[in-house]
Image: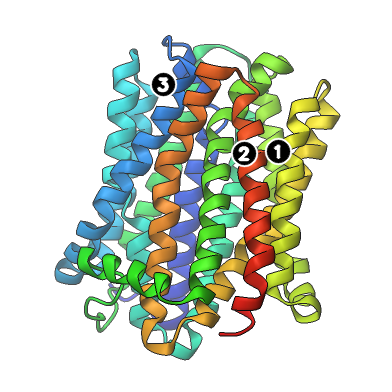
Amino acid sequence: MTNKATGKGAIGVLLLIVFFDMLAFGIIIPFTPFWAERYGASPLEVTLLFSTYSFFALLSSFPWGVISDKWGRRPILCLSMLGTAISFAWVSQADALWMLFAARAFGGLMGGTLPVAQAYIADVTPSQDRAGRMGMMGAAIGAGFVLGPGIGWALSRLGTGDADFRTAFMIAAGVGVLGFVAALLFLREPPARTQSDETSSFSARIKAFSVAGATPGVLYPLMILTVLAFCMAGLEATFALWTERQLNWGVREVSIFFLFIGGMMVLVQGGLVRPLAKRMGEAKLVVAGTLLMSVGYASVLFVYAPPLAFIGGALIAVGFGLASPSLTALISRNASDEHQGAAMGASQSVQSLCRILGPITAGAAFSGFGRDAPYLAGAIILFIGFLIAIRAIRYVNKY
């Protein structure tokens, strides 16, 4: 078709598809815990629902990359967005807990949008411009994740019945359909595809971790990134459950909270990180960020009124906003040119694993030791990350 975008236009369409993918995901985050509880899910089962999606998404990420090498990026993006829409529609019609798990597992298996979108950018972007384009993709992800809870908040004002939960998931499905239509009608297949790179095979992922382990300037930031990703995944899965019991919050209040912290992260990453990094260096931003996150997690233990929850959330959001992009920059800077792909592959794999293990661990702590346990443990783990960051400064400045 002659109206399909090429060049910069293709990148714009691709970013729109990524935005739709994350917007749909952001819409359902505040609703998922409460929807699962309506079918008798325990806190552990709620968090396992989050981990189920992440597990199957990780499991399918490599096959989607291989298939897109053979079939093309555009067909897989179309298939993935269509599968995402079907999974959300399936959740909306669920009438038992097992159906929620089945639908989220299916959504994970069809979740090839982000890895294939990264491959598309690599196909059409010169290496010297790739970091900037990946940054644009990160902005699209962030925008979708921020606006999604805002839509969830608007939907929550409609009422509190089952129909409103089902409507939220159907709207998320509709957003997935928009992504499918954008890929089908307006995205052109890239003229040439890169061959499998350092991040695209299982053996290469093993190599990625061996490279990281051999380079302290990469290893230490990777260790801290693991701490941050693990704790944030646990927060995402348990915070609605915690506020429901501690503050009597529902979907509306949880949506506002996630909208708030998402907006804070975007403001920090978009407006503060670059000038502060030039003045202080990324390593010091990591030290400050991990300390702020640790204090934010500890403050949750003293929350007895909604304003205090937002103060704690602000500390966590600002800390993560400072530390996360700084860690990515340090990993890339301290990896050699020939190991850039391996280092980024290790980073992606660590974050994927944390999105599986973080919710399960937080849910087990919540169920077994009380609702404050995940946040006490998170504060301690993040403080350990802070100590690692202090030690790491001399290494990341050396390499």
Q: How many marks?
A: 3
Label 2 neighbour load within 10 Å: few <14, some 14-19, many 20+: many
**Marks 2 and 3 in Cβ contact (< 8 Å):** no
For badge 3, the amino acid type reads Glu
Q: Amino acid at mark 1?
A: Tyr
Quadrant location of the C terminus in the rendered image: bottom right
Contact flag, marks 1 and 3 (Cβ < 8 Å): no
The amino acid beneath tag 2 is: Gly
Where is residue 37 drawn, in percent x and y?
48, 14
Viewed as shown, does residue 362 lie left or right of 68? right
Decide if residue 341 is on the left or right side of residue 154.
Answer: left
- Residue in view at x 74 percent, y 69 percent: 284
User: Which tag, 2 or 1, sits closer to the chain's start?
Assistant: 1
Count residues near mark 3 (Cα–Cα under 10 Å), then give few for <14, some for 14-19, many for 20+: many
Q: Can see residue 109?
A: yes
Residue closer to the observer: 257 or 361 = 361
- Residue 297: assigned label: 1
Q: Residues within 10 Å of mark 1 (few under 14, many from 20)?
A: many
Residue name at image x 76 percent, y 60 percent:
288
**According to the image, label 2 marks what residue?**
378
Outermost residue on the left side: it is 70
Residue 33: image x %, image y %? 51, 24
**In the image, is residue 330 above or below residue 336?**
above
Which badge, 1 or 3, is on the more N-terminal residue? 3
Location of mark 3 (residue): 45
Quadrant assignment for the N terminus: bottom left
Measured Cα–Cα span from mark 1 to mark 3: 23 Å
Q: Secondary structure at mark 3?
A: helix
In the rendered image, which quarter is residue 336 located in? bottom left
Please tell me which of labels 2 and 3 falls first in the chain: 3
